[in-house]
């Protein structure tokens, strides 16, 4: 599904772009933020340098996913990472803290396998602008079926270009492209598994998550190499304004006495997603949501203002 290559037309910008700078103030993560993301076939990353125009307007959606940032205390493994101030919930849960110099990952819960880093991974550097770089080694341990595994790795970032990013929903000015390369090794008594990542990520001031990234990974194990490549991009349009998004108003849900639905702490508009990220209900300023007719399981209510709350059917 992600083995096709999309031809990207690259042209020089008609007007000079401003050189963007990312900082914690403009690009730091906030509890309650969330994004709907689309997957597409791998697309060529295009040229390096200033004042580029990257045309990704023809991206076709393969599938969609959802990512959010929550209080670590609300997660299953949050107590194991007392220094973490924010948790990223996606296909794995990552635990991090952040300051004016960057975002630092303390570990992760990889679908039940908890990896604690004794040497944190610097996932982003701030302030960061064109030609800036960073390199960070990280290390940690975890256990699988009673066997100890040692993880080591090196993470590199380089801001190699900036310019205008053309997306299916419109254009984004002053986008900074960061080229990420990473090499990771998980070594145990019985096997060593390595992972090499090559990723180009386009950021704008005001959006902590990249608007677009194109990724190639190779995982090598005793069974041989597995190669994966894809494009991941924001479903919703962004403007690239240089200010952080306001924090959403707190949203809580209380189970109705009937046990068939929930009452909310305020009127909410948004969507109800199942555990696969699919929209199953749409809300318009609702104070109550009935879950009758839905399959038993976990659901996520994502409000239009960015607030989220988990529900159980």
Image (cartoon, grey):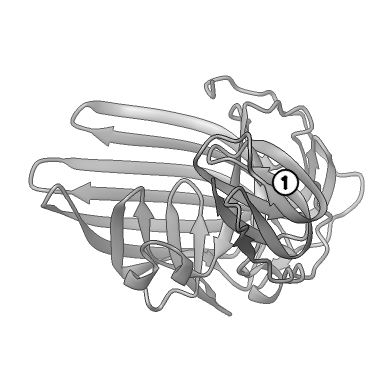
* Between 122 and 159, the one nearer to me in the picture: 122
For the N terminus, the quadrant is: top right
Q: Which residue lies furthest to the right in this view?
A: 15
Identify the residue under disc 1: 271
Q: Position of residue 164 (x, y in %)?
A: 80, 47
Q: Can residue 38 be seen in this view?
A: yes
287 versus 1 height, above or below? below
200 relative position to 97: left or right = right
Residue drawn at (73%, 55%), measured in percent from left and top?
Answer: 288
Residue 213 location, quadrant = top right
Residue drawn at (23%, 49%), measured in percent from left and top?
Answer: 186
62 relative position to 199: left or right = right
Q: Position of residue 46 (x, y in %)?
A: 67, 37
Residue 117 location, quadrant = bottom left
Q: Where is residue 70 in the image (x, y as percent from the top left)?
A: 55, 65
* Between 75 and 85, the one nearer to me in the picture: 75
Residue drawn at (64%, 74%), measured in percent from left and top?
Answer: 24
Q: Is residue 48 visible?
A: no
Q: What element carries label 1?
A: strand
151 versus 249 height, above or below? above
Q: Residue furthest left?
A: 189
> How crowded is the residue under tag 1: few (<14 C-alpha within 10 Å), some, or many (20+)?
some
Q: Which residue lies furthest to the front in this view?
A: 258
Numbered-mark total: 1
238 relative position to 104: left or right = right
* Between 179 and 287, the one nearer to me in the picture: 287
For the C terminus, the quadrant is: top right
Q: Where is residue 113 in the image (x, y as percent from the top left)?
A: 28, 52
């Amino acid at each position: 599904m992600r083995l096709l290559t999309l031809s990207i037309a690259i042209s020089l910008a008609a007007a000079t772009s401003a050189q963007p700078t990312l900082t914690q103030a403009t690009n730091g993560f906030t509890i309650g933020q969330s994004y709907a993301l689309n997957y597409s076939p791998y697309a060529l990353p295009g040229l390096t340098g200033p004042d580029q125009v990257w045309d990704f307007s023809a991206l076709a959606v393969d599938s969609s996913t959802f990512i959010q940032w929550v209080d670590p205390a609300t997660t299953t493994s949050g107590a194991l990472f007392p220094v973490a101030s924010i948790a990223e919930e996606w296909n794995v849960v990552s635990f991090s803290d952040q300051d004016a110099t960057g975002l630092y990952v303390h570990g992760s819960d990889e679908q039940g396998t908890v990896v604690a880093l004794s040497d944190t991974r610097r996932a982003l550097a701030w302030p960061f602008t064109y030609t800036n770089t960073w390199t960070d080694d990280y290390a940690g341990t975890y256990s699988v079926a009673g066997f100890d595994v040692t993880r080591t790795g090196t993470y590199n970032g380089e801001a190699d270009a900036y310019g205008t990013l053309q997306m299916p929903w419109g254009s984004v000015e002053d986008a900074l492209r960061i080229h990420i390369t990473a090499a990771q090794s998980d070594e145990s008594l019985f096997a060593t598994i390595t992972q090499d990542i090559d990723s180009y990520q386009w950021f704008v001031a005001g959006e902590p998550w990249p608007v677009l990234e194109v990724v190639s990974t190779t995982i090598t194990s005793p069974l041989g190499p597995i190669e994966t490549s894809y494009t991941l991009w924001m479903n919703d349009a962004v403007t690239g304004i240089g200010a952080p998004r306001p924090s959403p108003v707190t949203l809580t849900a209380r189970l109705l006495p009937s046990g068939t639905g929930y009452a909310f702490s305020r009127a909410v508009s948004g969507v109800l997603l199942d555990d696969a990220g699919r929209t199953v209900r749409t809300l318009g300023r609702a104070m109550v949501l009935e879950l009758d007719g839905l399959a038993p399981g976990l659901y996520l209510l994502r409000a239009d203002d960015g607030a989220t709350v988990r529900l159980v059917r």
